Image (tube, rainbow, N blue to C red):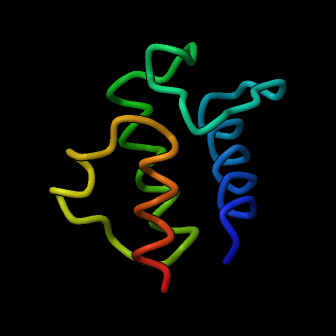
Amino acid sequence: MERQDILQTLNQIFIDVLKNPGLQIDETMTAHDVDGWDSLSNMTIISEVERQWNFKFKLHDIVKMRNIGDMADCIMKRSK
């Protein structure tokens, strides 16, 4: 899977979870950059990502994610 495909799918997950149809994410964005991305919605996003790619994040993976790019990196590693 290409990184751009992952980012497009992530963008749709963020749109769905945060109910923000105009949202456009990029790799540098953090929770501070996106309205509605709080600790509760973060867990929903994580769950949706796990469901989409059919794997479970390890706790240390989640703790190391600082932005959307880190999430995409982790998805690339886990989906190989």
Instruction: Give the residue at the far bottom of this rendering.
Output: 80
Given residues 34 and 27, the one toward you in this image is 27
Q: Is residue 18 left or right of residue 62?
A: right
Q: Position of residue 16 (x, y in %)?
A: 69, 40
Q: Is residue 9 left or right of residue 48?
A: right
Name the residue located 40 percent from the left edge and 22 percent from the top edge.
38
Name the residue located 46 percent from the left edge and 26 percent from the top edge.
30
Q: Position of residue 19 (x, y in %)?
A: 69, 28
Residue 65 position by quadrant: top left
Instruction: Give the residue at the far right of this rendering.
Output: 22
Question: Is 59 drawn above or below residue 52 in the view shown?
Answer: above
Instruction: Give the residue at the far left of this rendering.
Output: 60
Q: Is residue 16 left or right of residue 63?
A: right
Name the residue located 75 percent from the left edge and 53 percent from the top edge.
8
Given residues 54 and 68, the one toward you in this image is 68
Name the residue located 57 percent from the left edge and 13 percent from the top edge.
35
Q: Is residue 22 left or right of residue 37?
A: right
* Count of numbered tags: 0
Placement of the N terminus among the 4 image quadrants: bottom right
Q: Position of residue 74 (x, y in %)?
A: 40, 62
